[in-house]
Image: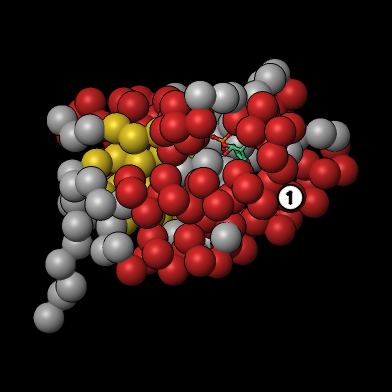
Amino acid sequence: MSRHRRKVIYLLGFMGSGKSTVGKMLARMLGWPFIDLDTVIEAGQGLSIREIFENSGEPFFRQIERAALTEASKAEPSVIALGGGTFAQPANIDLIRESGGTTVWLDCPPEVLRARCQGLQNRPLFRDEESFTQLLTQRIPCYGLADFRISTEGRKPEEVVEQILSLRVF
Ligand code: S3P
């Protein structure tokens, strides 16, 4: 007997992989609400992600990220764009997998991620080449636990959305 799959799609992947852009489009196509976890966190704190990291540090950020994730996971239907580190915290992976939704990893080539991260201002964990490579290497095994991996290489956001829709699991 197949387990009931909740109408919740979690998009995961490294900073700059297109989770928010693809998530918004996907939600529009499905007619489902879109939740961007970073935006929820910023609104809740009245601060940017960078300010949260600067004022209170990463452990505090991870606590409020988990609280935001717990709340967001209750919404159905929904498309949820996770932060780049959300699906790298073991407790969050458990919560998400137990939630009964579908996880989709937007797998983007490292050189594209690097170039995009260099252009982003609000990403305190992107510091330099070395920390980028280290973080990406640590996270890939976690991202690999997603139900589906979609390669975004050479694809426009619209094409990535089509790929996700063609999975026909929801
Ligand atoms: C983070 C990624 C960011 C944001 C925070 C931490 C990470 O989200 O949650 O800066 O640990 O990789 P995006 O992936 O949306 O940039």
Numbered disc 1: secondary structure: helix
Task: Give the colour scheme of this rendering.
Answer: secondary structure
Q: What is the number of callouts on the image?
A: 1
Asked whether residue 52 appears in the rendered view, the answer is yes
Q: Which residue is mark 1?
A: 135
Q: Is residue 152 left or right of residue 9?
A: right
- Estimate the x, y position of residue 162 in percent, counting from the top left: 29, 35
Image quadrant in which the N terminus is located: bottom left
* Left or right placement of residue 169 versus residue 43 in this view: left
Mark 1, other Cα within 10 Å: few <14 / some 14–19 / many ≥20: some
Q: Position of residue 142 (x, y in %)?
A: 57, 62
Amino acid at pointer 1? Leu
Residue shown at the point (31%, 26%) measured from the top left: 25
Residue shown at 48% from the left, 53% from the top: 66
Front-lying residue, 60 or 108:
60
Ligand 1 occupies quarter? top right
**x%, y% of residue 16?**
59, 31
Residue at the limit of the structure toward the bottom, as seen here:
1
Does residue 42 sit above or below 3 in this rendering? above
Please tell me which residue lies in front, 143 or 72.
72
* Observer-nearest of 71 and 15: 71
Name the residue: 53% across, 61% down. Answer: 144
Q: Position of residue 129 (x, y in %)?
A: 85, 37
Residue beneath the point at 29% across and 32% down: 34
- Tell me if residue 167 comes above or below residue 39 in the rendering: below
The reply to whether residue 168 is in sight is: no
Q: Is mark 1 within 8 Å of ligand 1?
A: yes
The image quarter containing residue 164 is top left
Where 21 falls versus 91 (above or below)? above
